[in-house]
Image (cartoon, rainbow, N blue to C red):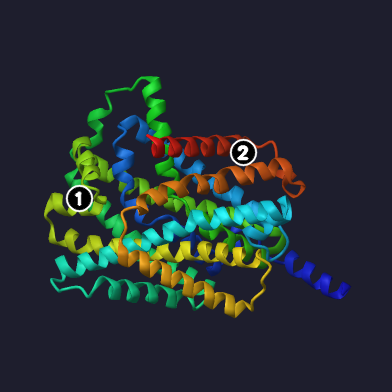
Amino acid sequence: MNDQANSVDERYATTPATLTSWSRQDTTWMLGLFGTAIGAGTLFLPINAGLGGFWPLVILAVLAFPMTFFAHRGLTRFVLSGRDGSDITDVVEEHFGLKAGALITLLYFFAIFPILLIYSVALTNTVSSFMEHQLHILPPPRAVLAFVLILGLLAVVRCGEQVIVKAMSLMVYPFIVALLFLAVYLVPHWTGGILSTANEVPAPSALLNTLWLAIPVMVFSFNHSPIISAFAVDQKRQYGPHADERSSQILSRAHLLMVAMVLFFVFSCVLTLSPAQLAEAKAQNLSILSYLANHFDNPTIAFAAPLIAFVAIAKSFLGHYIGASEGLKGLVLKTGRRPAAKSLDRLTAAFMLIVCWLVATLNPSILGMIETLGGPVIASILFLMPMYAIRKVPAMAKYRGQASNVFVTAVGLVAITALIYSLLS
């Protein structure tokens, strides 16, 4: 037993923990994190963020990296603080007890699963519209199309978590190229757009109100909490006591890539379109790609936009599936039943397929409301729960006293109160 422990210690001691030994697996995870965060929500971010005016957008741009990095680092550290191999639901139970573990597992599932349903509907709508308007062919019945699309994505899921992450990392490359292409394509068309509001410095109360309502948009456009648990478990398995350092390095690179790419895309859009045009896009309930395609009447953009949207939605679906399936399995296990791992995987996949297919076929308008309801729960898990654990859990005591903890707590409270206000207003 001692020899085994010594061999484990030696393996961890020789595990590389510096950026000079960056591995292909680290790059795969970096792109997987990017792929989960940067999806369909990004296509609406220029509209929502740009409507507030120039100065609120500049402030949000400055806050983007610390908001996303510190929050997701906190959640990663929370998962790392548990026993080896424990996912987020196990760690909650370990630190807070059985009842709290069951409650958080339930909230975790219902925060992520509605987003998976939304992606199922969006994917079906995108492909159906593409077949009808760009390919000029009659799409199959909605029920058939939705079933084929969701079954195709679940076929990737059945190949295992590592295949999912690799598939997402591969899908990131064309998405990055597409975002860059669109952002650069718009440069000659910059008219100043949002700069027309630069001379209008809002009153402090108005500025704070705008930021208050806009922060949730920024937070959830970069959210990749559903994949953080799997990411942390894999880092602990790979790097042992060095997992915190390595995961922080991967997160920082992923977030720098996210922020740089998305903000360039956002600013290119808002420098091209006027505030009135952004308001028109929001009133028409269009993504920025669809509005730009109509605005320029450009065949290239009209053809590329749905393809980009498909990639964005598909990779976000895969990333959110990891979190949703993890939550569902945790709920099953907390009922006291202990099915075999393979049986549980099959049951989870079958449940996801049936529910996602039904919702995608029915196409209910209530989905937007469900997403809003899930927002405060995600903010609670991503921002507040890890900060509470730092204060209360001995295993996380070493992270106390950091200024970033106050910042993350404040942003979490802002996001939750703004989302509740938006829901009630």
Q: Which is nearer the eye, 153 or 257?
A: 153
According to the picture, the residue beneath numbered tag 1 turns out to be 291
**In the depicted structure, whether residue 54 falls above or below residue 171:** above
Q: Position of residue 33 (x, y in %)?
A: 49, 59
Graded by Cα atoms within 10 Å as few (under 14), some (14 to 19) or many (20 or more), the crowding at tag 2 reads: many
Q: Quadrant of residue 239?
A: bottom right
Image quarter (top left, top right, bottom left or bottom right) of the C terminus: top left
The amino acid type of the residue labelled 1 equals Tyr
Q: Amino acid at mark 2?
A: Asn
Where's residue 67, x and y in %? Answer: 50, 42
Residues marked 1 and 2 touching at CB (< 8 Å): no
Disc with the residue nearer the chain's start (1 vs 2): 1
SS at badge 2:
helix
The label number, if any, that marks residue 30 in the structure image: none
Q: In this rendering, does residue 72 appear at all?
A: yes
The part of the image, by quadrant, that contains residue 243 is bottom right
Q: Which quadrant of the rendered structure holds the N terminus? A: bottom right
Q: Residue furthest right?
A: 2
Task: Give left or right: position of 406 versus 179.
Answer: right
Residue hosting label 2: 405
Q: Is residue 182 above or below residue 216?
A: below
